[in-house]
Amino acid sequence: MVLALGMRMLRTTDPRLLWKFGYNFGFKGMLSVQRFKKRLKKGEVFPPFLYISIINSCNLRCTGCWVDVGAPQAKISFEEMDRLIKNAKRHGNVFFGILGGEPFVHPDLMRILAAHPDCYFQIFTNGQFIDDEAAREMRRIGNATPLISVEGNEVVSDQRRGREGVLNKTLAGIEACVRNRLITGVATSVCRTNFDDLVQESWVDEQIRLGVHYVWFHTYRAVGPDAAPDLALTREQVREVRRFGVETRRKKAIGFVDAYWDHEGRALCPAATGISHHVSPWGDIEPCPIVQFANEKIGDNGGDIYKTMVESPLLEDFRKSAAGATRGCVVLERPDLLKKIVERNGASDTTARGLAMQELEGMQPRNSQHDPKNEIPEDQWFYRFAKKNWFFGFGAYS
């Protein structure tokens, strides 16, 4: 199926964009991970993949969202982003995930992409601001893939996202991306209300029909001010999501991304392994997007993000404590442990609402992707090889 996907991308994508993806993300991304491995041997942890929420504002009000989208707008300026990316590039980084809020609300999004043609960006978006003009501009710049969120059928989408007509507007964004020959992805947060609709071959077939090149399943995380724990998946459903992903990679001409299992099917947490950390719209450096506590900001040490991350006691404590407790999500499984990490490091609440500790204290332990003795290994050679060499435990769980 890898060959079939490659042929489909050749037919439907701008060749220049494929080159940018293959060179900036593929080849240079592999080199970035190799540099990360070398740094680990020296005890220096600087993630090769940085995820940056550039703005908190959003036009939707999704259930389970942990971002203060209704708070006064906060955004990382072009100058701050430019300095951060340049500093990271000096240490071999080339890949940046762009989150929000809604990234397309940021007035300088395209300018940020254009300023760094030697990097690759994945934009997590609801797709509702992507029209032909925006898609043409992304094609012109050439170094970004939109990852557009779809939460299920029309009824579920409206319920989950707090607005009417959400799915149709999102589909219009997908169609604009495909029409302009972008490498286009679809992400979904799988929960109890959309599980039966999305964890189906027919749903994947529909994405292929639409022209989507890859999908990314996140499992719903009951966190934030409107946690809606009734939406959280059962352990059996999480296991089925994993099984479905492995089978889809083998059977369908579409990429299927997951970041929470290694090549043997063992759970992992990207933040615990040190392969990724997160920057908030306020410039706070956090272990991951759902851990909304920090002690450092991107402006510390004269803007030297490398020095700030490598020397952060909070990030180091989080990685070691999380990896020592579970291979899964410590936020879900051990909120009590996360509370201890925050308290002993004197970390600050990085939310606008100022209720992150109260929310953490109210959390009940839940299952995550950690499911010992029920591992489902990768059985598609390309994904297995890639995960084994460039996205696995990196010794965090040894």
Image: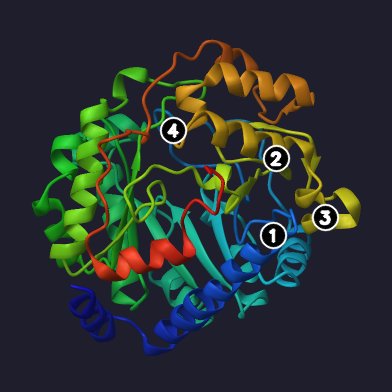
Please say if the residues under marks 3 and 4 sit with CB atoms less than 8 Å apart: no
Earlier in the chain: of badge 1 and badge 3, it is: 1
- Residue at (74%, 35%) from the top-left corner? 314
Label 1 and label 3: CA atoms lie apart by 17 Å
SS for dot 2: helix
**Which one is closest to the eye, mark 1 or mark 3?**
1
- Residue at (26%, 80%) from the top-left corner? 6
SS for dot 1: helix
Q: Position of residue 392 (x, y in %)?
A: 46, 55
Q: Residue 362 versus residue 163: which sits nearer the camera? A: 362
Earlier in the chain: of badge 2 and badge 1, it is: 1
Mark 4 highlights which residue? Answer: 61
Q: Amino acid at mark 4?
A: Arg
Mark 2 highlights which residue? Answer: 315
How many residues crowd mark 4 within 10 Å: few (<14), some (14–19), many (20+)? Answer: some
Earlier in the chain: of badge 4 and badge 1, it is: 1
Q: Position of residue 374 (x, y in %)?
A: 25, 37
How many residues crowd mark 3 within 10 Å: few (<14), some (14–19), many (20+)? Answer: some
Q: Position of residue 396 (x, y in %)?
A: 56, 45
Earlier in the chain: of badge 3 and badge 4, it is: 4
**Which one is closest to the eye, mark 2 or mark 1?**
1
